Amino acid sequence: MEKEGTWTADNERQFRQMLRSLNPDPIDAISIHAYGEDTDRIAWAVRAAKSIKKPLFIGEFGVPGTGPEVEFRRMLRIIEESPIPLSAVWVFDLPSQNADYNITADNARSYQLREVAEANARVQKGGTLRQQK
């Protein structure tokens, strides 16, 4: 959009350039949001953060709706297996997001809390996050 004035999707090189320009020094981390099928962008962001030499924070991630448990688990696993030091699922107990993203302890997306807790436990035991580099 910045260069061409269109909504044409960026390629990985363009994506890296934008992350670099939007996160100049002294900003010491890179933050992205990832939803639905943004798994390719997560991989791009991991590589970009490594080349820019800044940690990556996924400030929001999630999949819309109540049925795509497989998609959520896939996204969480990609995050867990990548060297991403911190990420946050979108969103807990925000009623305005009930239609697509809101997670509570007793709604149809409650499994996401369990999945995140289990991923955190695996990481705390020294697993994944690329075997704690």
Image (spheres, rainbow, N blue to C red):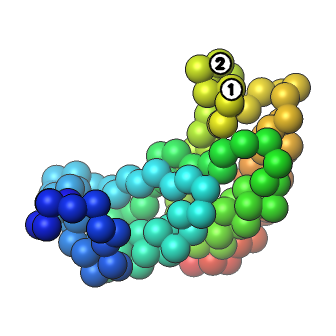
Identity, as a three-letter code, of the amino acid under mark 2: Pro
Disc number for residue 112: none
Q: Residue at x 72, y 42 (%)?
A: 65
Label 1 close to label 2 by CB (< 8 Å):
yes
Residue 98 position (above or below residue 82): above
Identity, as a three-letter code, of the amino acid under mark 1: Asn
Secondary structure type for disc 2: helix
Q: Quadrant of the C terminus?
A: bottom right
Residue 33 position (above or below residue 70): above
Can residue 118 be seen here?
yes
* 14 relative to 36 in the view: left or right: left
Give the residue at mark 2. 95
Return the residue nearer the eye: 59 or 18.
18
Give the residue at mark 1. 98
* 16 relative to 3 in the view: left or right: right
How far from the left and from the top, in percent, is residue 25?
A: 15, 58
Residue 100 position (above or below residue 106): below
Mark 1, Cα crowd under 10 Å, few <14 / some 14-19 / many 20+, is some
Secondary structure type for disc 1: loop
Q: Residue at x 73, y 56 (%)?
A: 72
Q: Quadrant of the N terminus?
A: bottom left
How far from the left and from the top, in percent, is residue 77?
A: 71, 66
Mark 2, Cα crowd under 10 Å, few <14 / some 14-19 / many 20+, is few
